[in-house]
Image (spheres, grey):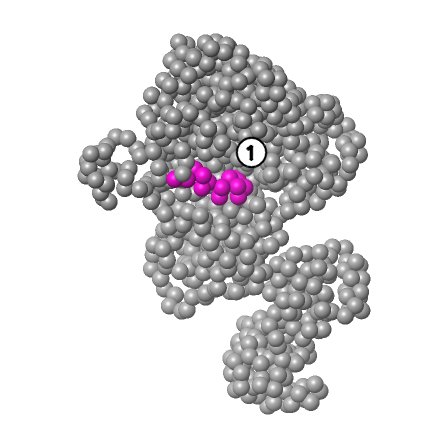
Amino acid sequence: MPKLIIDNIPVEVAPGTSVLEAARSVGITIPHFCYHPALAIAAACRLCAVKLLDGPVKGIQMSCALPAQDGMVVSTTDPEALKMRALVIEWLMLNHPHDCPICDEGGECLLQDFTIAGGHSRRRYQGKKRTFQNQYLGEGIHHEMNRCIECYRCVRFYQDYAGGTDFGVMGSAGRVYFGRFQEGPLESPFSGNLVDICPTGVFTDKTGRFRARYWDYQFAPSICQHCSVGCNTSPQNFQRETIKIVGRRNDQVNGWFICDRARFDKSYLNDPQRPREPRLDGATCGYDVAVDAAAKSIAEFVRNNGADNLALVGSTRLSLEGMILLVQLAEAAGGARLCYYDDPAQQQGSVAAAKLLHEESAAYVKDIEQAQWVSLHAVDLMEEGPMLALAVRKAYLAGAQVFLVAGDALPVQSTLPFKYTAVETLDQVPFEGGGKGVIICGAGSKDPDLLAEMASSGAKLVMLQPGANGFAAALLAQEHAAVPLAELVSSRQVRGVVCFEADVPEVLLSELEVLASADWRRGPVEATSPIFLPTTTWVESDGTTINYEGRAQRFQRTRVAGLPLKGLDPKYYGSATEAVALHPPHVHRKEVPGGAERDAWRVMAQLIERLGGEAVEPLTGKWHALKSLDPEGEGARIFEMGLGE
Amino acid sequence: MIPETLKTSLQARVASAITAREAAVDVMKELQAHYGWLTDEAVEEAAALLGLSPLQVEELATFYEMIYRRPVGKKVIHVCDSISCWCADCDKLIQYLKDKLGVGLGGTTADGMFTLVPCCCMGMCGDSPAMSVGGTPYGRLTPELVDEILEMERKKA
């Protein structure tokens, strides 16, 4: 373990650690642009210069590309190093436009920070700046090449890390240009990360440009709810609108990056058409009136038809809190049936996967990255868990063999960022003991016997759940003997349902009486339900999800619920007695327009109370340990907490 | 479209390389010789031959100064403006070339014979100032010598 001294602080680091990383480990940030922990070293920007006063090498060195060695004495504040860095920043700024006020990166720009930190405040260069034509790169990303400082982060990410081939670096010397061969949308499903990774404003998020500055945003640690990988994100909100979503580091899940779906697919959160008002028989009403009515309707139905004929329908979209309270609500309703899935095949596969996975068998992301072989079993990875494709790519680049078993059903446009061998059955994958291999499959709609066969191979397993919180649904479905809704309907066991964030297919719906429904999105259930209770999305609530590997992660409320202020109809400011004025009233009001929504689990808790049950906290009993999970931490696998099978 | 014979010989060249990428420069030069310059079509053809994306070929094509991504004259004059030649007053030489040919840097003469481009060192520092015309290097240049060389190159063409 090399021991060195940085700014008079003795540091001991693992072999191979760079001086820059060693300094960072004791809280010293050496300015840098091209260095990024997830990418290979380029040593292109020359900004991380330090002076080595003593040891095996001496003088000015680039700290990102210099491995820490025994006996090094490093100064980050030596006048020579300071001068070097000041000159480098001045040189990097030669061509950079003075357009910070109209640049969307302003305020969250590494170049701004280090220009100020480097002490460069007076322009000496009076020559012409080099300029470029920008390219159209699709609807996600805006291109502004004039701002480029040639750190090569974008191309190293796009081609090396994410395996894209349609974006790169062209030209040489002062004409270096980062773009595409011809204008057009970026093809990589990870292209949005260019926004996060660019140290300045060359790539900005087109879906949220010019809406707010960094200091305007409200944000909190959140978890993406698009698939069961559970990538860590940070939604940036302004005036009740989710403007941008950026990646948040979690080395156990998504590393530094997120896929484009996580980043750009957010319009439904801000949708002015989102059902935000509680409704009773088609008319808007107060929330408590709707809850009372729902409780009454449930009680009445149970009295007339028996609790057996009633099903409480949840889904894999619900937070763990909601799923737990659904069980208690069923009890409070006198023993109503529980559903977390409508499709029997999905429940069967999902539950089988949750049963098969345990601490030894469930693959960590590191296991995928370091695997000797990876077998994808009839899974559309770009659909079911895009970020795992990057983990498989790491293994592939390190020499792992990748197999795609029975992959004919895959859509052609899903190009994977690694090469693979297509085989027909699992038997054709040369296991060789299985020790360092990983099998990746989708758990939903899979035959449990097939899943068990995979588990018996001795390989590490990734079984992607149907739905973001499918693992939790599987645990609860198993524990409380939940039955898929389709089964209950076909055997005519239930006639009435209460839905909580459940997407019941219309075929089933036609055979059922919906008593009440709670959801944050529109749909056939919401449309047919006589009582509607609007709920919050994950950006507007606290909650817990369990991802495909059994990792429980907490997310926090990132903003209050309610209609985005932008484009808000003046009627929301009007009063019932006076004519609607175009200007908001000059008086304070406490309620947020459209902000009546409540968390699904709180709605359930209120229903439980109304039905004569005990007031309940969801994360109690065996779930108590999850309550103290740090939303900014790495989460915890439930097996470690004794919560798995 | 390139003729089938050229395509077959290029395919053989790519097949004999350990990685396709290392044959890229050869493929680009052959296609450039065929078209006169490396057209957009040629970039895509090279990409198909090499199993790369057009962008990845473009990255290489735009890096090398002897791959021309725009139409050029029959012969390209690369005149060095790097440090050794600069010490030998290449500025004056470049000005002389511009005046003589009636074009700026990057321009092609009206008769389509010469295109004048600067280059950054061709390893002839000992014979600076230096240039190359249609691939033939010339050193220790003077205005008189330049006149002679251009005359000769024009006749040879």
Q: Is residue A254 left or right of residue A27?
A: right
Q: Quadrant of residue B30?
A: bottom right
Vertical placement of residue A286 versus A234, above or below = above
Residue B67 is situated, as x and y percent measured from the top left of the image, at 64, 69
Vertical placement of residue B86 versus A5, above or below = below
**Residue A268 covered by magenta stretch:** yes
Q: Nearer the viewer, residue A134 or A324?
A: A324
Which chain letter goes with mark 1?
A
Q: Which residue is mark 1?
A: A227
Inspect the image, locate mark 1, and give the three-letter code of the amino acid beneath it.
Answer: Cys
Q: Is residue A315 left or right of residue A200?
A: right
Picture residue at 38% right of the left edge, 26% below the top: A281
Q: Is residue A93 left or right of residue A388?
A: left
Q: Secondary structure at mark 1?
A: loop
Can residue A61 be seen in this snapshot? Answer: no
**Residue A36 covered by magenta stretch:** no
Vertical placement of residue B62 versus A55, above or below = below
Can residue B83 be seen in this snapshot? Answer: yes
- Please state, as top left, top right, bottom left or bottom right, where the N terminus of chain A lies in the image: top right
Picture residue at 48% right of the left edge, 28% below the top: A525
Q: Nearer the viewer, residue A504 or A69?
A: A504
Q: Quadrant of residue A123?
A: bottom left
**Start-end of magenta stretch:** A256-272
Residue A425 is situated, as x and y percent measured from the top left of the image, at 77, 33
Picture residue at 70% right of the left edge, 85% below the top: B157
Residue A300 is situated, as x and y percent measured from the top left of the image, at 43, 12
Picture residue at 77% right of the left edge, 55% below the top: B18
Q: Residues within 10 Å of mark 1 (few under 14, many from 20)?
A: many
